[in-house]
Amino acid sequence: MNPSSTISLSQYKSPWRCLARSFFLSRRRWRAIAKQERLSVEQLRQQLDVAERENQRLERQVDDLGRQLDNLSNHQPTSVAAVELPRWDKLPGHQFSAELISLACQLSSCVGFRAVPKVFACLNQALGFSLPALTRDAVRNWSCRNGAAILQQNPRADDWVWMIDHSVQLGKMFVLVVLGIRSSAMPVGRALRRDDMTPLAVLPSTSRDKAEVSRQLTELAGHCGTPLAVLSDGAAELHHGALALKNLGFSGVHLDDIKHKVSNLLKKHLKDDERFQAFVTHLGQTTASIQQTELDHLLPPRSKQKCRFMNFDRIIDWATMAQQQLAKSQLTVSPEAERLTTKLGWLNNFSDDLLAWHECRTLVGKVLAYANQEGVFKGATAALGTQLAACRPKSELAQEMQKTMISFYQDNEDRLAKLPRPSIRLPCSTEVLESAFGSFKARQGDHGRGTFTSLLATFGALFDRVTPQKIRQRFTRFKNRDLKQWLKDAGLTNSTQSRRTKAYEKTKKRVTESKH
């Protein structure tokens, strides 16, 4: 020992031989770390030199390009010559062609109605096009008319598979949506896309009770034919409505949406779980504490107000990522690492729970992916069971959920035996319908302030790839007066938005009259 050291061996309980060996190994370990850090510093210096040389080269290149641009600008014509567009014949009774209406409808689905006239103006200015000036109301009318015309097609068949669901309530109105796909058109090995589906009905009403749903589905079956199968999220009124079809000769099957079944299963296991509720509480506190800090990139995902357990996968994925960031920060000593530990260190108290929840998340992800891509068919449950067995869950929660989810799939598969062709393949996920609801609510939120308006007529267009030929056919048989009648029958002429507009107009009129 160094005689000048102030450390006294009497303060250690271990023998001096053990202490000497420990100090020696510690010194050797720190020497290795220091050597590695010196190598890292040298590598970074070399990379910095390379980056500086590259930066100098790019600066020279920018200067050269700037001079070339100046030379081109001196020879650039002052105005862009107008580009002659193809000659498009106007639709009978319209000022515009089917090609232009089709283009406007496609653009509106991407950028909204208000932006389409601006896009046309930008194209005219930048590229010299001669596109005519449009108004936002014209684009909206075309989109509504196209969507409502799609809903009037009502193709009749005896092998329809219906996918039914209610939208989330907006105001006092509900909307029952029925999508259809022919059993012979079911894709294999991929998830359903919107263009696979045919929108059969968009039925707004002020009630969603069993009697109303039964009436709506019975009336639709009279137009399109009794379906071969019905898929819903398990709501009681939808089940009752499907049973009412028996009066029309319905002898098919009613399948349950696997995603909603799994969500209800998660709710059953986690709703009253104290550990999970404590975890969710910490999530909310973490959001409040880091959203205006340098850690805002680690914000937890937003929780859904409804169907909260459908957000389970995103929450667990976030927790896994945050744990990795936390573990990485604990290897360094810095103010940022200390702050990260302060804000997210609570995750370490849930390490064992997160292992179990991550196993559940993995199983749920595999079940939902399988349901989306494969549907249900004879032998589907056995194939799914093989995939889940490969996960080898260790926690009791994950093992129990694995058995229950397999039983959900087995229930759907057993129902296929009632069909004339038990080997048929049917969908068992309403993901494509839920996706369409999300897209429509995004559009509705931009224009309707949370209430159904005439925009509901555009819902059918979410499942269609509009073309000029389709516009010609639909606008020939479906006039503006037909659109007005559809909106009136749907109860959308007296919507919350229209009543709000009328209220403001009356107030404005009275204020004007009082001034005079």
Image (cartoon, helix red, strand yellow):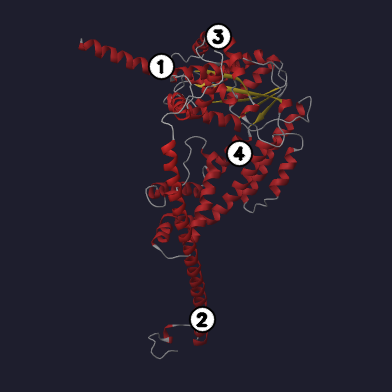
In which quarter of the view is residue 86 placed?
A: top right
- Mark 2, residue position: 22
Tell me residue 505's x, y (percent): 33, 14
Which residue ends up furthest to the bottom in the rendered image?
A: 3
- Give me the C-alpha separation between circle 2 and circle 4: 54 Å
- Mark 1, residue position: 498
Q: Amino acid at mark 3?
A: Pro
- Give me the C-alpha separation between circle 1 and circle 3: 31 Å
- Mark 4, residue position: 262
Image height of 205 relative to 196, above or below: above
- Give me the C-alpha separation between circle 1 and circle 4: 39 Å
Q: Which disc number belongs to residue 73?
A: none
Q: Quadrant of the N terminus?
A: bottom left
Q: Amino acid at mark 2?
A: Ser
Q: Nearer the viewer, mark 1 or mark 3?
A: 3
Q: Residues within 10 Å of mark 2 (few under 14, many from 20)?
A: few
Tell which circle, 2 or 1, labels the residue nearer the N-terminal end.
2
Tell which circle, 3 or 2, labels the residue nearer the N-terminal end.
2
- Report the front residue among 254 and 323: 323
- Give me the C-alpha separation between circle 2 and circle 1: 81 Å
- Mark 3, residue position: 92
What is the number of callouts on the image? Answer: 4
- Report the front residue among 272 and 8: 8
